[in-house]
Amino acid sequence: MEPQIETGAATTAKGDIQVQEPTRAERLVARRAAESRATVPHFELTTIVDASPVVAARAALREAAKADGVPSLSALIIKACGLALREHPRANGGYRDGQFELHSRVNVGVAITTDDSFVVATIPDADAKTVREIAMELHWLASRVHAGTITPPELAGATFTVANLGMAGIAAFSPPVAPPQAAILAVGVAREVPVVRDGDIVAGHEMRLTLVCDHRILYGAHAAAFLSRIRALLERPQDLLA
């Protein structure tokens, strides 16, 4: 949707000013972001993943599949989050009205960019699905978002959120937590870097993960253990494909 521009532009020291009316989606993002930053006592943890194994696994899957639904890096990350969330119930929970909410299902929300904003589509039961099933569902949801045919049930029920700006070359960022969720994971680019292996300098890949947490339900040591588990799974992608 094109933004609505009010007529009668004002002239100031900054030049002409055109006032734009936010779209409904943009107003929703503004309200939720302000609510999160104002009400959630958040903290951040960042880790660096040796991404060489997961990048190699992704390439091998692409070579073997030669078809649609080839697992993307995002699908592997979502699967790693699903397994780690199952092992860390607080991270899969939420804080609401002074109480902890612990969920029986692991539903990973994925931020998908639209023309004017973004939406968070949900991969239900991400811990129980295969990487290929997650990849196909992610592709399907993204196509529906871009076609404007996504439905409210497909945008509901997330117990945790993943935001990935790696495809834009962003190394690290800090998105707001989506209340009442306990945390959100920000994924940076998997970039090629020199690494030391067995005393030799060789080409490798590293990726930064930033976990933004609600301190009311997820504490430092628990959040660190959860983020470390995601890192360990990505560094052993065979555990994601079992």
Image: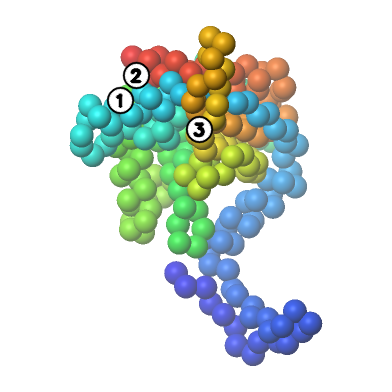
| Picture residue at 59% right of the left edge, 40% below the top | 171
Quadrant location of the N terminus in the rendered image: bottom left
Mark 2 vs mark 3: give the one in front. 3
User: Label 2 is placed on what type of residue?
Assistant: Leu
Asked whether, in this view, residue 38 is left or right of residue 158, the answer is: right
Q: Position of residue 31 (x, y in %)?
A: 64, 56
Instruction: Confirm whether residue 234 shows in the render.
Output: no
Q: Residue furthest bottom?
A: 8
Residue 192 circle label: 3
- Residue 116 position (above or below residue 47): below
Which residue does the numbered mark 1 point to in the structure image? 60
Q: Earlier in the sequence, mark 2 or mark 3?
A: 3
Quadrant location of the C terminus in the rendered image: top left
- Which color scheme did the rendering employ for the protein? rainbow
User: Label 3 is placed on what type of residue?
Assistant: Glu
Q: Earlier in the sequence, mark 3 or mark 1?
A: 1
Which residue does the numbered mark 2 point to in the structure image? 241
Label 1: how many Cα within 10 Å (few below 14, some 14–19, many 20+): few
